[in-house]
Image (spheres, rainbow, N blue to C red):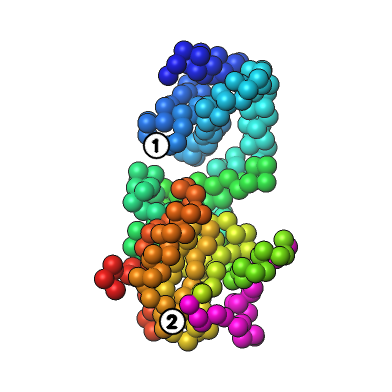
Amino acid sequence: MDNRYESFVETFRQKLIDATGYGEDRIFYKSREEYPPTSGDRLFVKQFEANGVTEVCALYVGDLYEEYRRGLGMDMIVKDVVKRLQGISRTDIIEKAKIISDYDKIKNYLFIRLINKNKYEADLRDSVYRTIGDIAMVLYVRMGEIEGYTSSMKVKQHMLEKWDMDRDEVFEAALLNTYFISPPRIYCWEKMLFDTHYEGENFMNLLSDYPIRRGAVGNCLSTVKRTNGAVAVFLPGVASRLADLMQGNLYLVFTSIHEVMIHNEKTADPEDLRHVLIDTIKETTPEEDVLTFHIYHYDRATGIFSLCDEED
């Protein structure tokens, strides 16, 4: 850490302590190498604590330092950060923390998000999740809205134990919530290119026979929100509906955490798909959005998801 950067961090921290009235122990610095390791140095701010849940905001000080170097004054940076922290305190996060130990009150806020099990092994410690191959289906709880973005936290093992609920029952409830929060959709690339308001195709409507593509091109599956949309294939009834429309088994190609390409087993080769996936990730997928480099399979008869072996 050079002297100018070190001086900025310490001065900024002290000014933030003064501006918020928080004690020294509530605003602390961690380098990028410290657990949990991330892409940058952070200044952590403990917002509140309730029912054993601590809300901590992480500020990436490297980004703030770059703003300072470009001429933005220290006081302006502090003022902007304080405004954001106050925005968090105005959300319903505190109220959610108060009820988080009561399953009946919190269950409607549970949802599932996908991450790579191996890459985020440290982050998954004590978390509640299922695994399929190298994909972790992680249980989260929605804590509130901050400036249009959803604030959430992983459900920890001790929370599940406090609820005294069956893990599978909780997971099924969370999967159903995820479905209704952001329903699954198939997206046609040509429509996405020319229609900025395009919201995808509702292939789950059982009253219509959606004209799904059964050829080599495949179908792009995501959700209405198109954020963390790859989870759509694991939502209740989705894979079986797709397999019925395809009239066969499926190959799943997770091009990112936001979408998954669905292919007909009869018209696709997993090794070809694997090469396409690797090229797609290298060319278009940001590192933080990569889910897996493997191809997955769905069996229509058994309803089982599995990892395709390299020799398949």
Indicate the amino acid at tag 2.
Thr
Q: Is residue 262 above or below residue 139?
A: below
Q: Main secondary structure of the magenta part?
A: loop
Number of other residues with Cα within 10 Å of mark 2, as a class: few under 14, some 14 to 19, many 20 or more: few
At a point 51% along the width and 74% down the height, the residue shown is: 218
Q: Magenta stretch?
A: 197-216
User: Where residue 72 is drawn, which disc sits there?
Assistant: none
Asked which quadrant contains residue 13, the reply is top right
In depth, the one of 243 and 187 nearer the eye is 187
Q: Identify the secondary structure beneath mark 1.
A: loop
- Where is mark 1, residue-wise? 36
Q: Do the residues bearing badges 1 and 2 touch, measured as CB atoms within 8 Å?
A: no
Give the foreground label among 1 and 2.
2
Q: Which quarter of the picture shows residue 123?
A: top left
Depth order, front residue of 20/231: 231
Q: Which quarter of the rendered picture does the C terminus lie within?
A: bottom left
Q: Give the x, y percent position of residue 85.
A: 63, 31
Q: Which mark is residue 267?
A: 2
Q: Is residue 70 left or right of residue 258?
A: right
Q: Secondary structure at mark 2?
A: loop
Residue 50 in view: yes
Check residue 61 for magenta coloring. Answer: no
Question: Do we see residue 171 in this rendering?
Answer: no
Quarter of the image for the N terminus: give it: top left
Q: Residue at x 59, y 71 (%)?
A: 186
In the image, residue 53 above or below residue 288: above
